[in-house]
Amino acid sequence: MASPTLQWPPDITESEAETLTLLATTYALSHGLVYLPVASIQPPAPTSSIHAPLSLFPSPIPRNQFEKARRLQNTYNVLYARVATDVEFLDRVMGEEQGVGQVDEFTGQLWRQWKRLRSREAGIVQKLHLGLFRSDYMVHAPQSTGDVSLKQVEFNTISSSFGTLSQRSAQMHRYLHSSTGYFGSSPYLKSENFPPNSTTSGLAEGLAAAHRAYGVPESRILFVVQPNERNVFDQRFLEYELLEKHSIHVIRQTFDELAISAEVDPQTHVLRIRPQSKQLADSPSAVEISTVYFRAGYTPTDYPTPAHYDIRGLLESSRAIQCPSIPLQLAGGKKVQEELTKPGVLEHFLCSTTHAKVFTAEDLADIRSTWMEMWSLDQGGDEGVSRAREHSANLVLKPQREGGGNNVYKDAIPAFLDSLPEKERAAWIAMRLIAAPKGLGNYLVRAGGTGGAVKTNVISELGIFGWALFGGDDGSVDEKEVGWLVRTKGEDSNEGGVAAGFSVLDSVVLVD
């Protein structure tokens, strides 16, 4: 992720690579940088784990670009908080009557649940929202210009994962450096170039802030999770941090479990959850929930029936603070990302004097500098599709989905456009591809492989975490930038999800 002229990884011998692999994998297994193994159904009590996919070397990132990404997170936290509270904007862009919800059933289902709650007599009873965000970037280094800049891939507002495992990945690379010095293979590999990462405590701090704002100390935080979750340890470390540092208990349930256990008091709107027999033996009766943290609900497969959307609506109807609320989840849609690039839209959210904080022209220029060109496929009738055909070799098409494996790239675009019904064009955006630096590689290690570390050319993606608590009557946004991750994949892989099997967990070495 550094300049196009930097060669990476440093030269090491086969024996040194084997040593680093042994040290990395045993460190990962010893320190919780792990997954559950693949299984059709995970047992109630896990009996084994495997190390998460990882890199042997941290990836080089220009120091100024890394610092810029961290600085911008504070602005992005406020921007998306304001998007989520602009009902008129979200109705127009993501709603069923005017926006994406007309043609994208998943988006439409969520929007309809939100509209139904707004129209009932009680309205939305909890004004506060919590966002645990991650803004993802790549270094853009087009060979035609030689310039190096930071470009945003996407902004995640729901289930922004790998915060706690990314911290452990960074610690693993520090350990490899401390124990071996990376065999003196590179002058960049020195301790001052390994930035600290405390994402676990930072994300837990956001959840704890929402819990305190709810105001009932003995209440609990609900983690809504997917069944058979392999990435459970990334979630459990947040649970441990909340209990050990904030004395806050967590209860974990799936949507199917919540269909049986969740109830909202019709008078007080308090959300209570009846624990499963294996949970909370000290509290057999229903427990009050302060905050609902979604590590599920970001993909249509999490809602196999209309009743599952109704469960989401039930949670949203309560006093519990949602992380994210439905409007905040909608704000993370790719269509919103594209809409923000249009003239005057960013000014509407960041420069209006009706807001508690007004941003400067320099702030807006910094944000805009991270954007690639984007447009909707329904732009100007057939214009959006025609442009996508013409420039397909340098484009990615994105739907309103999270979790990896959903995009359409380059040569696959023309055939996809041939099959795309005209009415569904509004659900897709076209985005210019980011030109990642060429010639950078790493050693990638996946559990179960027989060949050890695999050296290959790679592309890396930097994610910056932040949280925001907002929605109160004063319009203020309590927010913070809290850490980072790096995901690295082979340069021939289009997708980037670690959980989806495309990427490995990595970390940062800063270069000038």
Image (spheres, rainbow, N blue to C red):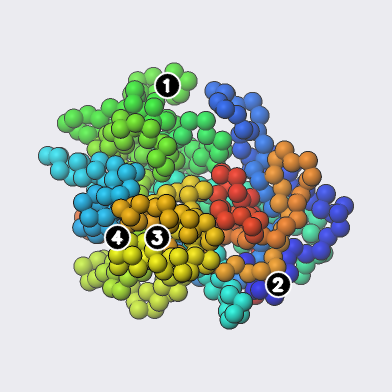
Q: Where is residue 260 in the image (x, y as percent from the top left)?
A: 34, 22
102 vs 283, left or right, is left
Crowding at dot 2, Cα within 10 Å, few <14 / some 14-19 / many 20+, comes out as: some
Q: Label 2: which residue?
A: 6
* Marks 2 and 1 close (CB-CB < 8 Å): no
Q: Label 1: which residue?
A: 276
Disc 2 from disc 4: Cα separation = 40 Å
Crowding at dot 4, Cα within 10 Å, few <14 / some 14-19 / many 20+, comes out as: many
Pair 4/3: label in front: 3
Q: Label 3 sits on what residue type?
A: Ile
Q: Label 3: which residue?
A: 429
Q: Where is residue 323 in the image (x, y as percent from the top left)?
A: 37, 45
Name the residue: 69% across, 65% down.
440
Q: Where is residue 411 in the image (x, y as percent from the top left)?
A: 54, 60
Q: Earlier in the sequence, mark 2 or mark 1?
A: 2
Disc 4, SS: helix
